[in-house]
Amino acid sequence: MEALYVVNPVAGRGRALKVSRMIQDICKGRYVFTEAPMHASEIARLAAKEGIPLVVAVGGDGTVHEVANGLAGTGTALGVIPAGKGNDFARSLGIPLSPARAAELISTGFLRVIDLGMVGGRYFLNVSGVGFDAEVAQEVNSSGRKLGGPLTYILGVLKMLRRYDPVPVEIVLDGVVVRERILVVAIGNTPYYAAGMKMVPHARPDDGKFGICVAGNLTKAETLAMLPLVYSGRHISHNKVSTYSAARVELRSDIALAIQADGEIVGRLPAVFTVATGCLRVIVPKGEPSVS
C-alpha cells in the first residue's frame, strides 16, 4: 500500500526524527517533515485529496492529532508510529509503543473504523475537557515545553494546584442537565491522556458515544491523593467522581474556562462536544476490531 510518512522532527525532543531514520528500511514510502503547528494537518489533507491510501504519523499524540484532523471523513487511513512522550492514542488502540514493532504493523495490521470527538471545529482522538487539566495544559504549553510526558504533566499539576479551585459548571448530557462545582470534566473518545492516565476508563472509540468523567468539588489534599489512582482508572470509585455516557455534551459556566483537546488549547466555554461517528480508518494489530 502506498504510504506517506509525516514526521514531526521535534516530537519527543527529537526522538521522532531518529525513529524516522531507523524505520526507513522497514517502511518504504515518501517522508515529509512538518515545519510549523498544524502543518501535519495540511500535509494529510492534501495527501487524501491526491488519493494516497495511507498516511502515517511519526511522532507523539500532537502529531497524530494533527494528521487525524487532516484525514477525518476521507477514505485515507491513518497509521501511527509512536515517537513522542505520551503516545496515548497508540496505547488506547493496542498499537505497539515500540517504534520498530509499530513500523512492522504498517504492512501487517488491519483497518479499524473509529469515531472522533469534535469541539470548536477541531477533531480530537483521545480526551477533551475543561477545568484543572485544561488549565495545566495551558500552563505547560505556554511555557514552551508542550504537554507530553508524565513528569511534565505532574510538575504542571503541582504548580496549578496551588491556585486552582473547583468552579461551578452546567453540564448537559444528551439533554439532561447536571450542575456541579467541578475540578475536571473529561470527555473521552478513548480512555487515556496525559501520558498514561486512564482518565475515562469506559470510553470506547467506536460506540458512538463519549465516556465522561466528572471530578467534583475535591479539596487540594483529595486531588493529590487521587492523582496516582488515575493511572489505573481507580479514581472513578471516589465518592466525588461521577461517570456518564453521552453522544452530545454541552458545557457552560460563568467563567470562560479553557478547553483542551488532546492536550491542545482549542477555545473557551461555552462549548458543544459531539461524536463524529466512523469518520477515521486506523491501522491496528490483529485482534482489534477491523474492517475489510
Image (cartoon, helix red, strand yellow):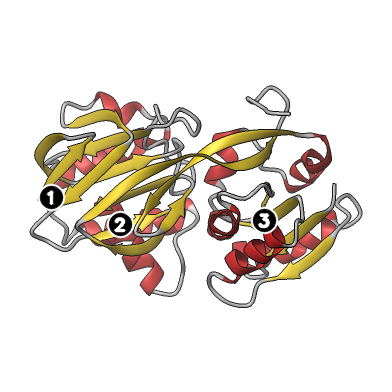
x 24%, y 54%: residue: 271
Mark 1 lies on residue:
166
Amino acid type at circle 3 is Ala
- Which badge, 3 or 2, comes first in the chain's sequence? 3
- Asked if residue 137 can be seen in this view, the reply is yes
Mark 3 lies on residue:
57
Q: Quadrant of residue 228?
A: top left
x 62%, y 50%: residue: 74
Q: Height in image: 77 above or below 212? A: below
Q: Secondary structure at mark 1?
A: loop
Residues at marks 3 and 2 touching, judged by CB atoms closer than 8 Å: no
**Left or right of 104, for residue 258:** left
Q: Position of residue 217 (x, y in %)?
A: 11, 41
**Left or right of 82, for residue 225:** left
Q: Quadrant of residue 141?
A: bottom left
Q: Disc 3 versus disc 2: distance between alpha carbons?
A: 24 Å
Residues at marks 2 and 1 touching, judged by CB atoms closer than 8 Å: no
Quick one: 122 or 137, which is closer to the camera? 122
Quick one: 104 or 221, which is closer to the camera? 104
Of the two numbered discs 3 and 1 in the rendering, the one whose residue sits closer to the viewer = 3
| Neighbourhood count class around disc 3 (C-alpha, 10 Å): few under 14, some 14–19, many 20 upward | many
Amino acid type at circle 1 is Pro
Q: Secondary structure at mark 2?
A: helix
Q: Disc 3 versus disc 1: distance between alpha carbons?
A: 36 Å
Amino acid type at circle 2 is Ala
| Neighbourhood count class around disc 2 (C-alpha, 10 Å): few under 14, some 14–19, many 20 upward | many
- Which badge, 2 or 1, comes first in the chain's sequence? 2
Q: Secondary structure at mark 3?
A: strand
